[in-house]
Amino acid sequence: MRLLNILLIAVLIISASVVYKIKFDSTLQAGKVDRLRNELRHERNAIATLRAEWAKLDTPSRIQALADRFLPQLQPAKPTQFSNFDDLPARPPALPPPANGDALSTMAGSSNSDMTGSVPAKR
Amino acid sequence: MLYGRDVDRNVKAKARLILAIVVFAGIYTVIGLRLVMFAIASNAHGTHHTFAQDAVATARPDILDRNGQILATDVKSPSLYAEPRKIIDVEEAVELLTATLPDLDAKELRERLSSKRGFVWLRREITPVQQREIYRLGLPGIGFLTENKRVYPNGTTVSQPIGLVNIDNQGIAGIEKWLDGQGLAALHMAGLATDRLQRPVRLSLDLRVQWALHDELAKAKEHFKAKAAAGVVLNVNTGEVVALVSEPDYNPNNPREANDPTRINRMTTGVYEMGSTFKVLTVAMGLDSGKMTLGSTFDARQPLHFGRFAIHDYEPQHRFLSIPEIFTYSSNIGAARMALSLGVPYHQAFLKKMGQLDRMRTELPESAEPLVPKRWADINTATIAFGHGLSVAPLQAAMGVAACLNGGLLITPTFLKRDRAEALQVAKHVLNPSTSVKMRYLMRLNAEKGTGTFANVPGYYVGGKTGTAEKVINGRYAKHRLMTDFMAILPADQPRYLLLIMLDEPQAVEGTHGFATAGWNAGPTAGKVIKRIAPLLDIEPRFNLPDADHLILAKTVSSNTSP
């Protein structure tokens, strides 16, 4: 009978301490979740602010004003300047093998300087 | 003494014991329940604070254009408030606050701080720097709340369609107001709209096209000294509004401008007599009736008389005109005779079918009822045939013209992104597809050799129709107060987009040879806009195409071409 009592008391003490520990841990975890949530909120707000700022810097009216000021040599594209894949000249039958192992300089030497762009100049 | 003297002491003790047990059991039950409640509620307690801070923050979903560019978004910004009951020294607080925020009115501030209210706003939306400075002052009873501030990064460019919000983040115009009608207002009332994770709203607008249109219209308004300029780009196959501009407009970041009545959205809120662009509908009606063909001719030798009134032509030809000639010379007499030959009831029924007689409802809350004549006699049909005597919202007219060109489908315009299948569900079949083909031909013909030549950008196969209406001033038509408009379709053989340009009272300027009609101002403006927007709309330039007779007509209607 006495043994049983001692056993029960021991179980009681152990379970109480386990419950206390779980409770303590959960409080810690809850605090952590709260902190993370707060952090998330802050990050989201920061992202929103940055996105708004980006959109403001990216707005076409601003870009056009900047382009007019700093890139005066740029012109709007004319309809004749658009092209499609069908208009590309056919690939040359065979490229001459690179003479000195430098493919780029070989190609530059063999290319026809009149054939840049896709639309032939109007006569 | 509950019991008499003669009661057994044992029974008495038992009763007292039971009473004590019940009382204690009750007390412990209450304590236990309370503990359970605390255990459950304690988790929520930690986040309670942040919710309180966000409670005034009525978040709104972002508004994006069709490519995902931000048109409107929320940014958190601190607002300054005071709790007057907690303030110890009002004079000190006033002095320090006005030193930090110099534009704060000292007298008003003193009044507010001396009041006995629990809470007063001092300044909404201060900068983080100001917040830090005020925080350092260490005044009791002064605090900050984080609020959502609506920002419109594109300023005036898209203000007309998206509208704006007031200081409490409630939509008061445009798409913003529509959003509130979609249940957002109820969320705000319940204080639940605090979440940034609301789904963004994706509009049909394309910011790049919108800007090109905005820029060209602003230039045109300046150049032709017009009172106003407006334009819309409509996808004729889905009814999506790709761009909508109405100059003068306002900056939604500065709400005071928006109240100015001259800055209304002319495309949906104003109703106008559209002038000759309405002949598109008249001719489509004639061709669709089956009673006439492209070869049919109408007498345009004499002005058409109705009692005191006479209908003249702008470029009189003094002969019989075929339908293509009526269209390209923009003959008022011809159009009037054409409508009269079908009769008033037919004309009315046709315009009703084309949605020109009822108020058109889009997402925008601003809309206007068309001005329809109360008594509709022959003379009304004659004038409405060339666009006078019936005032409609320009976007509504664009919808009707789009139906004439897209194969006969009347699609109510929308500001939300949608695809062809969704559009077909709401589309109404109003015209024969063959009529539509003939209308494309006529539009193209007019751009090749009619009044629309200035808008004919080589490569994009534009079709177009001009319209010039005299404005009604004090009940009479004013000869020199014009409303000019231009409807362009591109490309004309397989229509994808309809462009409508409208100028209010443009003047004859250098280079227009003294003319102020649509062909000289709205037409060239449309040309400039097309040059800029066609590449953005993914329209491939084509050259060396055959003329309209061969490209559009030859395929489908060979029997009707020969007169």
Image (cartoon, coloured by chain):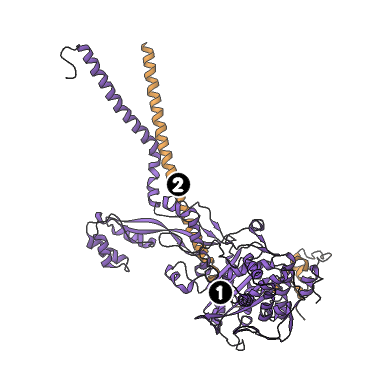
Chain colours: A orange, B purple
Nearer the observer, B557 or B254: B557
Q: Is residue B66 left or right of residue B84?
A: right
The secondary element bearing badge 2 is classed as helix
Amino acid type, residue under disc 2 in the picture: Arg
Name the residue at 76% across, 70% down: B552
Q: The N terminus of chain A is located in which quarter?
A: top left
Instruction: Characterize the local packing of mark 1: few (<14), some (14-19) or many (20 or more) Cα atoms within 10 angstroms.
Output: many
Q: Is residue A93 left or right of residue B69?
A: right
Label at residue A37: 2
Across and down, in percent, residue B343 comes to 67, 72
Residue A76 can be seen in this image: no
Q: CA distance from mark 2 to mark 1?
A: 54 Å
| Displayed quadrant of residue A23 | top left
- According to the image, label 1 marks what residue? B272
Measured along the vertical axis of the image, is residue B492 above or below residue B168? below
Amino acid type, residue under disc 1 in the picture: Tyr
The secondary element bearing badge 1 is classed as strand
| Chain of the residue under the numbered disc 1 shown in the image | B
| Chain of the residue under the numbered disc 2 shown in the image | A
Name the residue at 68% across, 68% down: B404
Across and down, in percent, residue B82 comes to 30, 57
